[in-house]
């Protein structure tokens, strides 16, 4: 398994990073960010804990929270990190990535997360290995991103974070780069 954070370096140092890891693991349905997620409106679909698929009649979760990344596993991970998501209805497509992505506004339209899920890590690598990691663009080319891009890769997931806010970038990168989805130990 490989996890990569590529892009800008945080100016915040190790202590806010440790605090973000600790605080990110403490989120829940009743926290303030979760409340804001449920109240979020806009053109997209606000993602809240209640919107994640529940278990079927046999008690088997409809959202597989182990193994490869799935759309609901991405949303589950971000919600548990206290991230306010607004999923946009239209997919994003880039000529240099073979799969369409899901766009999320994170707190506002100024902070965007683009998530690309591949059938396998090898499929993802075929696309991301051809990118300049500093610009999230094909080598020799340049994409005119609306904000500095940060590329995060974890197994079959590639994500492009577009934000001027270092804390937002760090929070998203940590949540998605913390490893593959794992079943709840309870």
Image (cartoon, grey):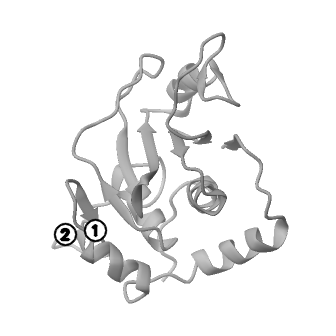
Q: Nearer the viewer, residue 81 or 15?
A: 15
Residue sticking out furthest to the left: 57
Instruction: Please count the marks in the image.
Output: 2
Q: Quadrant of the N terminus?
A: top right
- Where 176 sits versus 183, above or below? above
Q: Residue at x 23, y 54 (%)?
A: 44
- Quadrant for residue 4, please give it: top right
Q: Position of residue 92 (x, y in %)?
A: 34, 33
Q: Position of residue 72 (x, y in %)?
A: 34, 57
User: Compared to 57, does 97 lie above or below?
Assistant: above
Q: Of helix, strand and loop, which one carries label 2? A: loop
Q: Quadrant of residue 152?
A: top right
Residue 28, x across and y down, in percent? 44, 83
Which mark, by number, is residue 106?
Answer: none
Badge number at residue 56: 2
Residue at x 67% of width, y 73% of height: 20
Check contact, mark 2 vs mark 1: CB within 8 A. yes
Tell me if 50 is positioned left or right of 149 in this view.
left
Element marked by disc 1: loop
Label 1 Cα crowd, 10 Å radius (few <14 / some 14-19 / many 20+): few
- Front residue of 20 and 77: 20
Q: Which residue is mark 1?
A: 60
The residue at the point 30 percent across, 67 percent down is 61
Q: Say left or right for 158 vs 56.
A: right
One can see residue 69 in this view: yes
Residue at horizontal 24%, vertical 39%? 90
**Who is closer to the viewer here, 142 or 38?**
142
Residue 89 position, x and y percent, is 21, 45
**Measured Cα–Cα span from mark 2 to mark 1:** 6 Å
């Amino acid at each position: 398994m490989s996890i990569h954070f590529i892009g800008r370096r945080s100016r915040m140092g190790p202590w806010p990073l440790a605090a973000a890891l600790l605080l990110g693991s403490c989120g829940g349905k009743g926290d303030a960010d979760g409340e804001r997620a449920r109240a979020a409106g806009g053109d997209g679909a606000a993602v809240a804990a209640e919107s994640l698929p529940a278990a079927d009649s046999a008690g088997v979760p409809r959202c597989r929270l182990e193994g490869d990344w799935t759309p609901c596993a991405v949303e589950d991970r971000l919600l548990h990190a206290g991230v306010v998501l607004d999923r946009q209805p239209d997919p994003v497509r880039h000529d240099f990535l073979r799969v369409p992505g899901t766009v999320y506004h994170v707190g506002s339209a100024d902070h965007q997360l683009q998530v690309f899920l591949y059938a396998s890590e090898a499929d993802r690598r075929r696309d991301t290995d051809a990118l300049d990691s500093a610009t999230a663009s094909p080598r020799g080319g340049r994409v005119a991103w609306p904000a500095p891009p940060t590329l995060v890769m974890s197994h079959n997931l590639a994500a492009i974070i577009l934000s001027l806010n270092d804390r937002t970038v760090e929070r998203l990168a940590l949540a998605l780069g913390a490893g593959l989805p794992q079943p709840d130990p309870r």
